[in-house]
Image (tube, helix red, strand yellow):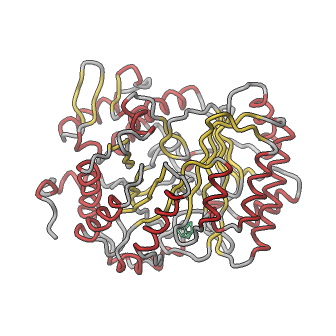
């Protein structure tokens, strides 16, 4: 199938100019630039400071286990077939939560909780029960709290979904990525469309009214024709939300990605066409395009929040619920609380050993400066509302002004009376439009050894995945 006519004729110079590495800005500064020395004892001080206010928490729980390794995986995931490995992890998670409870007290209100991985529904039902119990005995879920979980459609069962609904989970996110058999072969994730359809039907039958499907562009063997078929199949499943992430090929961070045949990966121009296809087809079907890479039905709370300019961005992606403090627990988990970003060790063995030694397993942190907070507000406003008001410009904005003059010339942004508005074309390059606001770009980024894959583990954000933001191509 040829690309729809509206997908032709993007100037090659534009694609080349903006195909540069850049962060996804789920945090600012990006994790590569966190350099505040903070150990477990320092983190205890941060937790005690957080305990002095009464703001509700957002809670992220990382459950890193999977039955097998997908070669495109960008998550911190550990492959195991052994229940005792998961049980040992839950022992340490319990310990980590106890140490946090000791500083923050019992019964802190939680208004949002997300379980990511890995594959949270890889856990057996008793393991899931145990994980939930260790949280429910320490935190108080607020009325209307949003509980969400990532799940692998190949593993989901009716009993599992019924139990999750019974506990109050309302948002379910399935990893789909691509439904083409050739692409699935190329990424080591065989997941027939019939399996995904059955998992969606099961979710509906068990009362999940908020279903998210993750798809991915930029994968090997994807073409505009194959991706069109995948999108149309996803549309037939009628999810409330779709996240459409670009594949990040970072084999130096995720060595198993070396098994990806890079010769079969789409070119930058084709990657851009795939994203444009997704935008065209989802919006033509009535979904609203939110921020960088999300689509939602008009009546979904995320779409409503976007229209009302209440969309927020954090490590869990786009959200309707701004939380003053985000607490992350589990291996590689990231927190944003008390004016600090903090991250646990991404190496399962190190995370466990540190907890066994009685310390919180923090490996990196960043104390947000006044300037960081101002620049973060501008970047997140841009990423959520697709506009940059003059009054959010940081001090020393001359480089931003110069960059935006170029963006206007290239048709990516247009001047308004109080700033710039991102054009539909510019939406495709939203990360590029945020980069001039980033005071850390071009500075030496630190090495992030703990985020590398190791013998016992493997950012970020797939399931969203992608929890740890990192640099990847912007297209
Ligand atoms: S992509 Fe998802 S299911 Fe596959 S290995 Fe990574 S975390 Fe596990």
Counting from the top left corner in percent of width and height, residue 270 is at 25, 64
441, 64: nearer the viewer: 64
Residue 179 lies left or right of residue 62; in this view the side is left
**Quarter placement of the C terminus:** bottom left
Ligand 1 occupies quarter:
bottom right
Counting from the top left corner in percent of width and height, residue 219 is at 37, 69
Q: Residue at x 35, y 21 (%)?
A: 390
Count of all numbered marks drawn on residues in the image? 0
Counting from the top left corner in percent of width and height, residue 279 is at 27, 51
339, 295: nearer the viewer: 295
Counting from the top left corner in percent of width and height, residue 164 is at 64, 55
Quadrant for residue 110, please give it.
Answer: top right
In the rendered image of this protein, does residue 408 appear above or below residue 61? Answer: above
**Quarter placement of the N terminus:** bottom left
Quadrant for residue 368, please give it.
Answer: top right
Residue 339 lies left or right of residue 23; in this view the side is right
């Amino acid at each position: 199938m040829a690309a729809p006519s509206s997908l032709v004729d993007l100037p090659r110079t534009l694609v080349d100019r903006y195909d540069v590495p850049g962060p996804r800005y789920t945090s600012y500064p990006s994790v590569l630039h966190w350099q505040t020395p903070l150990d477990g004892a320092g983190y205890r001080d941060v937790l005690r400071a957080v305990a002095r206010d009464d703001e509700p928490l957002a809670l992220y729980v990382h459950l890193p286990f999977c039955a097998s390794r997908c070669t495109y995986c960008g998550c911190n995931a550990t492959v195991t077939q052994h229940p005792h490995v998961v049980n040992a992890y839950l022992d340490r998670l319990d310990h980590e939560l106890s140490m946090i409870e000791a500083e923050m007290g019992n019964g802190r209100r939680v208004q949002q909780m997300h379980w990511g991985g890995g594959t949270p529904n890889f856990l057996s039902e008793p393991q899931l029960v145990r994980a939930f119990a260790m949280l429910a005995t320490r935190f108080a879920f607020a009325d209307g709290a949003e509980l969400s979980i990532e799940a692998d459609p190949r593993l989901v069962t009716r009993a599992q979904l019924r139990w999750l609904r019974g506990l109050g989970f309302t948002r379910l996110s399935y990893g789909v990525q691509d439904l083409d058999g050739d692409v699935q072969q190329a990424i080591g994730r065989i997941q027939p469309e019939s399996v995904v359809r059955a998992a969606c039907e099961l979710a509906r039958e068990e009362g999940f009214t908020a279903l998210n499907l993750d798809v991915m562009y930029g994968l090997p063997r994807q073409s505009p024709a194959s991706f069109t078929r995948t999108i149309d199949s996803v549309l037939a499943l009628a999810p409330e939300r779709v996240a459409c992430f670009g594949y990040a090929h970072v084999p130096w961070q995720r060595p198993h990605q070396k098994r990806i045949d890079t010769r079969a990966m789409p070119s930058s121009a084709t990657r851009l066409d795939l994203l444009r296809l997704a935008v065209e087809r989802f919006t033509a079907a009535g979904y609203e395009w939110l921020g960088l890479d999300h689509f939602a039905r008009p009546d979904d709370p995320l779409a409503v929040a976007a229209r009302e300019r209440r969309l927020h961005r954090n490590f869990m992606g786009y959200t309707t619920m701004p939380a003053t403090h985000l607490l992350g627990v589990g291996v590689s988990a990231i927190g944003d609380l008390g004016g600090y970003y903090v991250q646990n060790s991404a190496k399962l063995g190190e995370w466990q050993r540190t907890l066994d030694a009685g310390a919180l397993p923090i490996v990196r942190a960043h104390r947000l400066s006044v300037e960081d907070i101002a620049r973060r507000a501008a970047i997140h406003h841009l990423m959520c509302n697709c506009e940059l008001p003059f009054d959010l410009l940081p001090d020393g904005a001359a480089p931003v002004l110069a960059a935006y003059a170029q963006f206007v010339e290239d048709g990516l942004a247009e001047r308004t009376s109080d700033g710039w508005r991102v054009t539909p074309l510019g939406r495709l390059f939203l990360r590029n439009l945020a980069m001039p606001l980033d005071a850390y770009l071009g500075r030496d980024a630190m090495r992030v050894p703990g985020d590398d894959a190791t013998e016992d583990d493997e950012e970020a954000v797939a399931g969203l995945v992608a929890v740890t933001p990192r640099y990847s191509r912007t297209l």
